[in-house]
Image (cartoon, helix red, strand yellow):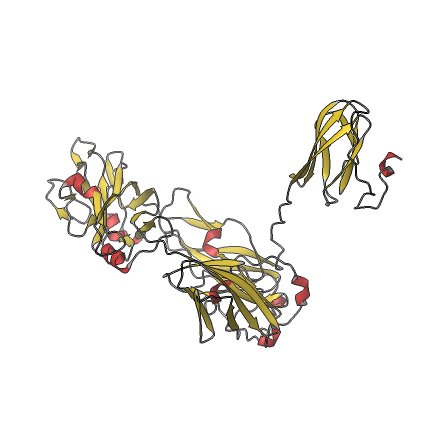
Amino acid sequence: MKKKVLSVVLASALFAGAAVSASAIVWGDWDSSSKSGDDSDITALAFTEKSYTIRNGANPKNMNEVITAYAGDKAIVQEPELEWEISENDLAFELNTEDNKATVAAFENKGSATITVTANEGKVKATCKVVAAPLIKATGFKFEHSTYTLPTGIYVADKSVQTIGATDLDDKTIKLVSTPTDAVFSDFQKREFDNMQIALVASKDFEQKDKNGNVIVSISKNDVLAVSDSNDENKFKFNASTLAGLYAGVTNARLIVVKAGSVQAISNSGVTRAAGAPVTSIAGSEDFTKVEFSAYDADKTGKTIARDVRAATEMGRPAERAGRTGTITIEVGQKADLGDYVKYGPTNANVKKEVGQWTIDYYNAAATDDDFAVLNDDKDAVLGVAVGRVKAVTTFEKPDGSTMEVEVPINVVARGAKSEPETPVATTESATLAIGGTYWAESGNENTEWTVDNDNVTIVPEKGAGCKIFAKKAGTATVTGTVDGEVVKTVNVTITAAGTTTPDVPSEANPSTGDSLLAFLF
């Protein structure tokens, strides 16, 4: 039987100063059927960032999505009781707390406020800053990617025709994104997308003959090879059935955005798709490589924006096998998308690259009393709950109907265990010494390795929190201190003839060790 209470195994003090997790729990998205936490177990709250930008007029920010609660060394999966407050607001923001949810909306173009969240009867709290900024309004749009490859169902090879059915192909979704980046589409602009389609258009003439010299494929420049048949706001889908009827031999193609109704079917003798539908052509040809897209407000003059993206067609090749790419290592409170850790073969497979629903399994049957990791409700992502090792298991269905199992090991480590060490702040100093003079260089890190670029000076020691520089010959030298390859200290030394300058040396002992300045001479 699984444990019903998230126990406090390590004191919260263990995590003092630990790095904040890279992603937060979205309450309700994770399988919590086997867990029941108590708010009194909460020992820490952590935001994903120290500050969040909220734009005036944009959708309110859901603060529950960026906060994680911890019970000692475990993450709490189900929703705790949280209290939210906003201070230093200056009327730029509105905090809405309802049904234990918290959203923050901005109503000014500038200003900041502090958000405080508490749990466990006020014993645990966390704070973050919210900053107001102007809304970025969309003035145009572009394709999400600069190139696309659409898998198809017909391929001409060795002057014979091979086909693949729609059931072996995947739908292909093409997304249009706003310009400038991160801009917001107005409701009017969103409605504009309802009147658009995306067409896959031949970039040049194409002809393919069979082994007897008969023309089996004849396509002219600007012929439409496929048209999106549905869209969800700014996401346009090419149906697998449509893709199944395309010839993969057309490698020179482009995607263009057209107004709905601008694509007209014409009769093209001898050229048909597998399903018998005639190849179509764009009325007006090149004219429809440009689309009128309104500026932010409906009453503003429309703006002509060219949208021409390289595309190609390629014969659909269903995946024949699947395996893992490596091991997942996440901190308690962090999540990982399981699909990112699956690879498919052969390498040129381009469709049917999918696996079944994931489950969590244990390497040791006795460990099933501990919830080291849980799946989300969609069973395609995993969340680290407690330090331990489990595996995610799924199945892959081969083209012949048989199945194979795919296992991905999951190591859940303590909070902060994966955090990158802070890069030391490099400092530079200059020193002018007479021959025989000395200078003490200090980095403050006992793992510092010291080097010098020539023999005008010597340094003692070569590793430690500091080193002593001895001037030997007139000239210049550079002394460098590094920690794990990162430069943390640079001393540019100028050495003059003896007696021409007063050595620039510290007047006290080595602050790191308390040794006298002559300690390294003996």
Q: Nearer the viewer, residue 284 or 98?
A: 98
Q: Quadrant of the N terminus?
A: bottom right
Please identify the quadrant where the C terminus is shown.
top right
* Image coordinates for residue 427, horizontal then vertical, percent: 66, 40
Q: Is residue 52 visible?
A: yes
Residue situated furthest right in the rendering: 522
Would residue 182 be found to the left or right of residue 269 on screen? right
Residue 445, how many percent across, how many down? 72, 45
- Residue 410 lies in what quarter of the image? bottom right
The x and y percentages for residue 116 are: 54, 68
Residue 371 in sight in this render: no
Query: Which residue is nearer to you in this view: 114 or 202?
Result: 114
Q: Quick check: 476 above or below 65? A: above
Q: Is residue 337 above or below residue 316?
A: below
In this rendering, is residue 124 above or below 522?
below
For image coordinates 33% across by 53% down, the residue present is 137
| Residue sitting nearer the eye, 184 or 18 | 184
Q: Residue at x 51, y 71 (%)?
A: 85
Give the side of residue 344 with respect to residue 266, left or right.
right
Residue 346 lies in quadrant: top left
Q: Position of residue 310 (x, y in %)?
A: 30, 39
Which quadrant of the figure has residue 440? top right
Q: Is residue 336 above or below residue 325?
A: below
Count of marks, rendered view: 0
